[in-house]
Amino acid sequence: MTKLRVLCTAVLLACASGQVLADAASHAADAERFLKLARADKLTVPVYAQVQQMFEQRFEQTQAPATKKATLETYQAKANAALDKAVGWDKLKPELVKIYTSNFSEQELKDLIAFYESPLGKKVLEKMPSLTQQSAQLTQSRLEAAVPEVNKLLSDMTTELAPKDQKKQ
């Protein structure tokens, strides 16, 4: 009887672990599908563009002749390869899947997918880069107005905290 109980328990555990693995695979697949809809594979495009621009600026600063343009292109390709090793989609995707599966249930991911496949969700995806940029510009412009006051407060605090013998100087 005990052997039968152990065997049944083992079968139940095997079935349950198989279901957990299937659920995890399904959850990960939903995360990948969401990431694809959200165009997460394009997250690093600005980084690549910025690095390319840095090389172009340095090339111009060196006042290299146009005949050396191939050298620039060689170094840009090497920089792209270095970026691919660090932030290429094949490097980021598994980690992003982990992030999304740990923060969203499978059902939540399914709901997100449904939203981003809807007309409104597609519009959100289309407008989000521009909205993010506009929001950052708004915040930056508002912060610029506060910088002088914050700098004055820092200066006042530094003066107040300075030892008395330094205040007299």
Image (cartoon, rainbow, N blue to C red):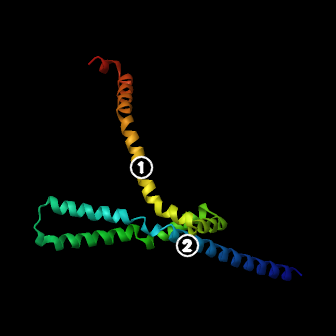
The residue where tag 1 is placed is: 136
Q: What residue type is disc 1 on?
A: Ala
- In depth, the one of 55 and 7 nearer the eye is 55
Q: Is label 2 in a helix, a strand or a loop?
A: helix
* Side of 40 relative to 30 (left or right): left
Which of labels 1 and 2 is toward the front? 1
The residue where tag 2 is placed is: 33
Tell me the quarter of the picture where residue 90 sits. bottom left
Q: Residue at x 56, y 63 (%)?
A: 120
Mark nearer the N terminus (1 vs 2) = 2
Query: Which x, y percent locates residue 85?
Result: 37, 71
Q: Residue at x 57, y 69 (%)?
A: 117
- Please state, as top left, top right, bottom left or bottom right, where the N terminus lies in the image: bottom right
Query: Which x, y percent locates residue 160?
Result: 38, 22
Q: Residue at x 66, y 77 (%)?
A: 22
- In depth, the one of 109 and 5 nearer the eye is 109
Identity of the residue furthest to the top in this view? 168
- Please state, as top left, top right, bottom left or bottom right, where the C terminus lies in the image: top left
Figure check: 58 above or below 18: above
Q: Residue at x 73, y 76 (%)?
A: 16
Figure check: 112 above or below 158: below
- In depth, the one of 93 and 140 nearer the eye is 140
